[in-house]
Amino acid sequence: MTIHQIIGQFIKEVGNTSWQEWVSTITQVVSVWYARKNNILVYPTGIIGVLLAAWIYFFVASPPLYADGLLNIYYFGMSVYGWYNWGRKNHTHTHIYPISWCTTRELYTGLAGFFLAWLIIFILLDTMTNSNTPVLDSLVSSSAFTAMWWMAQRKIENWHAWILSNIVAIPLNFYKGLMLFTLMYILFLFLAWSGMTEWKKNIQT
């Protein structure tokens, strides 16, 4: 496919974008912006976006991106958990979960969860669904699975996992014809890098 064909396909698909994809994209971008700023509004804005995204991945994408759909349901649950965690303060009115690096145990636990999730999701997609992208679909989901867990605890490593997830999600969503989501993940990639830099500065001060 030439560059002109890619651009032409992109313009055509954007023109056919549903309102659900538009709203999901906007609210998720706003959510990541709040995450970059370490603002608790990352969660209520994100909840709207991920619920709409789950609907799109299950009922609009063809074949459906099952892992991504389930992942957004997981995002919803973790958003509720993260919202609760980020709002917790101790008797001195400081956050119980401030920005921090993972301990060795937290790092290995997150990595173990990533590889286990990748294996399980791949097997499920490959054997029980009609997905034609099981390796990449499961990779996006497993890396985001770990990223969301670390993010709920304000661990800087969450940005590393998001960067990996976004790099894979960009060509995957383009291949599925979800052009607005493709643009969204490109923006997410830059925001994740910026967020990582911002959080590192925050912890230094």
Image (cartoon, helix red, strand yellow):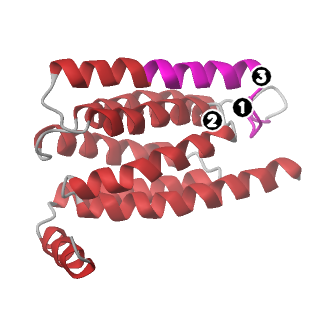
The front one of 191 and 90 is: 191
In the image, residue 9 sits, relative to residue 132, either above or below, namely below
- Mark 3 or mark 2, whichever is nearer to me: 3
Q: Quadrant of residue 15?
A: bottom left
Disc 1 to disc 3, C-alpha distance:
17 Å
Mark 2–mark 1 distance (CA, rounded to whole Å)? 6 Å
Badge count: 3
Indicate whether residue 37 is drawn in magenta: no
On the image, the x and y values in percent for residue 141 come to 39, 34
Q: Residue at x 22, y 82 (%)?
A: 4
Numbered badge on residue 57: none
**Residue at the disc numbered 3:** 104
Q: Position of residue 153 (x, y in %)?
A: 64, 31
Whether residue 98 is in magenta: the answer is yes
Identify the mark nearer the N-term, 3 or 2. 2
The mark nearer the N terminus, 1 or 3, is 1
The residue that disc 1 covers is 97
Q: Which region shows up in magenta?
A: 94-117
For label 2, the SS is helix
Residue at image point 35% right, 32% down: 138
Amino acid type shown at disc 1: Tyr
Three-letter code, disc 3: Thr
Question: What residue occupies the far front of the structure in this picture?
Answer: 1
Label 2 neighbourhood size at 10 Å, few (<14), some (14-19), many (20+)? many
Disc 1 is placed on an element classified as: loop
Residue 199 visible in this rendered orientation of the protein: yes
Left or right position of 14 against 199? left
Task: Tell which residue pokes out farthest to the right in this image.
Answer: 205
Tell me which numbered mark, 2 or 1, is placed earlier along the sequence: 2
